[in-house]
Image: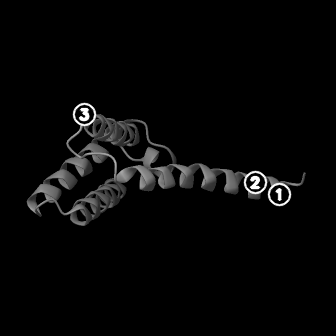
Amino acid sequence: MDVQTELWLLVLAAAGATYIWRGLGVVLSGRIRVESELFNWVACVAYAMIAGLVMRILVMPTGLLAQSLLADRLLACALALIAFYASRRNLFIGVITGVLAVVAAGQVRGLLA
């Protein structure tokens, strides 16, 4: 099997794995009560996974973000949270503030070096 065929098979397998769970969610969505313990458990697990991912990105980043200082990343995270809550939980404002804070910190550190 050539490389191109293997890549297409990997893409199809990944798409299949994603869409199977989405389809199952559509089928079961009418049967799950929002107030149920199962729904609360799933929501808690989802929040825990997101929190873990965010902490991993902050503490052990890869790529270009790994070149920034931990203090800069933590400052950007704090500013993003402040902007998020100050803008009545507007996710777009929080994300943009965090990105701009990381970029600004990098620029300031570059000027000081």
Q: Distance between the residues labelled 3 and 1?
A: 44 Å
Q: How far apart are marks 2 and 1 (CA)?
A: 6 Å
Q: Hey, which residue is sitting farthest front in the picture?
A: 31
Image x and y of residue 1, in percent: 90, 51
Give the labeled residue for mark 2. 9
> Which residue is pictured at 75% across the width and 58% down the height?
8
Please give left or right for residue 85 compared with residue 41 in the image.
Answer: left
- Amino acid marked by disc 1: Thr
Q: Residue 3 sits in which quadrant?
A: bottom right
What amino acid type should be assigned to the residue bearing mark 3?
Glu
Q: Which residue type does callout 2 highlight?
A: Leu
Question: What number is the disc on residue 5?
Answer: 1
Left or right of residue 34, residue 42 in this image: right
Q: Residue at x 25, y 51 (%)?
A: 76
**Residue 36 visible in the displayed image:** yes
Q: What element carries label 1?
A: helix
Question: Disc 3 designates what residue?
Answer: 37
Q: Locate residue 12: give its quadrant.
A: bottom right
At horizontal 15% and vertical 59% (from top left) the residue drawn is: 89
Q: Position of residue 74 (x, y in %)?
A: 26, 43
